[in-house]
Amino acid sequence: MASLSIDHVVKNFGNVEVIKDVSLKVKDGEFVVLVGPSGCGKSTLLRLIAGLEDVTKGDIFVGDENVTRRSPAQRRIAMVFQSYALYPHMSVRKNLAFGLENLRMDRKEINDRVSRAADMLGLEKLLDRRPKALSGGQRQRVAIGRAIVREPSMFLFDEPLSNLDAKLRVQTRGEIIKLHRQLKSTMVYVTHDQVEAMTMADRIVVMHDGIMEQVGTPLELFDTPANLFVAGFIGSPKMNFFDATVTSTSGGTVTADTTGLGEIALPIPSDSVKDGEKLVIGVRPSHTEVGEGPFRLTVEYQESLGTETFIYGRLAGVEELITLHVQHHYETDSGVELSFNLPAERLHVFRASDENRIPTTTAMQKGASQ
Amino acid sequence: MTQVKSLLGTLVGWLVSIIEIPFNLIERVIGGRRMPWVFMLPNLVIFGVFTFLPIGLLVFYAFTGGTEIVLTDRPFIGLDNFTRLFSCENFLSPYSCRESMFWIAVQNTVWYVLLTVSGMLAVSLITALVLDKITKGRGFFRAVFFYPVLLSPVVVGLVWRWFLDTNGLLNSLLVDIGMERIIFMLDVFWSRFWVIGVSIWFQMGFYTLIILAGLQAIPRDIYEAAAIDGTPRWRVFTNITLPMLMPNLVVVLVLLMIRSVQVFDEAYVLTNGGGPGTANTFLVQYIYETAFASDIRLYGLASAASVAMGVVLLILTLIQLGLAKKAE
Ligand SMILES: Nc1ncnc2c1ncn2[C@@H]1O[C@H](COP(=O)(O)OP(=O)(O)O)[C@@H](O)[C@H]1O
Ligand SMILES: [Mg+2]
């Protein structure tokens, strides 16, 4: 068991800076998910933690120990690879035992640990098979087993579920969470799938182009995204965005002329913006209220999921499709004009210049996240 | 332009129908299921005439006697050729055998094969491991090592003979650094040493390439998993690299063995006919000389030796393939 601390880490490949000055603290026993679009440097950061790549600048600590120059084995970190990276010519038993044999552990202890891990993961009947003779889900569990037997100070996962089918993915997700509860180990988990991140993480790190955009609990990221990127990346379907220009800051309320919505009041302090400033207003589909309201959407199509409905349509002057959400089944048709409302306290306001969030006046949102 | 095109189209159409007519006819006669044989026929004919027919003839010759080359003029003598080859008081001492030259050649060949195969395996494995590690100039070195493979064996023999000659480049270097001149090709040890050395130099690029391909096919993340598992270098090599390289090593071993048993041209030229004495006389040279280069041309005996060699090769290859399958 150990905490992890990444201190101003930079990684260059040639003259391309792939990780740009990242700092992060992971508490002992915490489950942290690194999430971000493909190519943003998640795997690279994980491999730096594991010691498979050397940092260009900065330090990495496991517990109190600076491991920056230590070999992967010395860091006592286990890693589960996206491809599983099982030893193809060894039986499952041997795959599990191999790392322990390297430690010159005695045979009995090795056998004990292997059978405990096999028991925990339901691999008892597969111990004498080769990886080739296993299904994807079983291979995945062997890969996790290989990590467990070493009783490492920390687990790293690099998109471990991306090679599984949808059903197995949900199931294995649950198993990994269960494993985390059982072992109480520190885990750093990489995925490009924000749903995985939201459902598994104690804390999420959103990465983009080699920097950390925001670190927080799933609810914090959902309720108070720090910038446009996080707002667009977290949540499904994606948040709706509208361009706006501040028209008035007098009388304690801010109003803005918003493309597609007209003149609306914004839930931000009037001293945080200037007249004429460009803004981007965001609202999640799940926070829209269909039925009554000042706004009109021309329906293009809908997705009915049985218990809920997503309606996609256009607003005058807005190029992108707008998504509305209804909590139950809802019948509509393309071309129909729908009225809807956007509750002012649910609006997210971002400055167009730096794309950062402008804190809202309503205490309600902050309250909800705690 | 369009006219030319349409003319071409018509021509192609004609050609197709010209080819189509006989094939349609054949298909009607023999049925669609047998058509694949028709398409394989040209290749089958070539293989038949230049591979299977000679093998058949060879077996026939092995069971006939006399010095005539025309098969119908040769008397059938059963196993006499084989009995002659294999009549020995002690198989380990060639001079106790009726065909002592054959057994000298067998002995030389066995030693040559053992040393060349193990030497070549070691050299090409090490070369491949080094080439796999370096990132700069890999292509260049691969080409350098592969280049000799492109040479003709006779050229290889001649170049090295010139290099190792009493007045050759190597000896003048030895003299320059104050050492004695060595007459390499008249010394049993040195001549054998150089025959094996030149064989390895000549062919190592080929085997290095096969092994390198195998090394590069091992996924990088398996090595990374081993690093995370804290595997010492030597154990990575013996427990991961070697087992995963096994299929390629078996291919190398089989090819290498077959080719070393067949050693002839470059060694013959290099040693000026298998010398000194019979120190570098190998099986194929024995077969060649028995059949074509002696006053009495014993085609039957030479054929029997060929058949024996073929059978031994076949058995060795089967054993290796069996082992490889078991290792899987
Ligand atoms: N060994 C490497 N050499 C050069 N560039 C690399 C290497 N590994 C990764 N990269 C680059 O670094 C960036 C981040 O890669 P990666 O960490 O794998 O992204 P992610 O896991 O988030 O999809 C990519 O642009 C990738 O091309
Ligand atoms: Mg990745």
Image (cartoon, coloured by chain):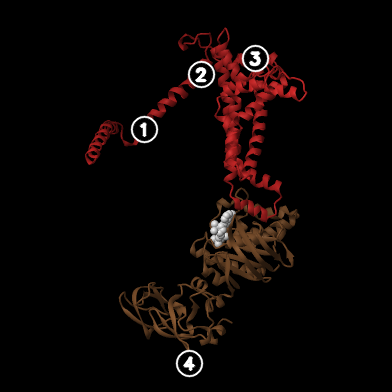
Chain colours: A brown, B red
**Residue at the image point whose x is 53% and y is 61% from the top:** A39
Give whichever of discs 2 and 3 has the lower sequence position. Answer: 2
Q: Which residue is nearer to you in this view: A363 or B282?
A: A363
Q: Chain of mark 3?
A: B
- Residue B166, given in percent of the width and then of the height, sits at 69, 17
The furthest residue to the left: B3
Which element is circle 3 on?
Answer: helix
In the depicted structure, whether residue B77 falls above or below residue A41 = above
Which element is circle 2 on?
Answer: helix
Q: Are marks 2 and 3 in contact (CB under 8 Å)?
A: no
The residue labelled by disc 1 is B39
Q: Are marks 3 and 1 in contact (CB under 8 Å)?
A: no
Q: Which residue is nearer to you in this view: A309 or B208?
A: B208
Q: Which residue is nearer to you in this view: A260 or B60?
A: A260
**Disc 2 residue crowd, few under 14, some 14–19, many 20+, Cα 10 Å:** some
In the depicted structure, whether residue B225 falls above or below residue A366 = above
The residue labelled by disc 2 is B58
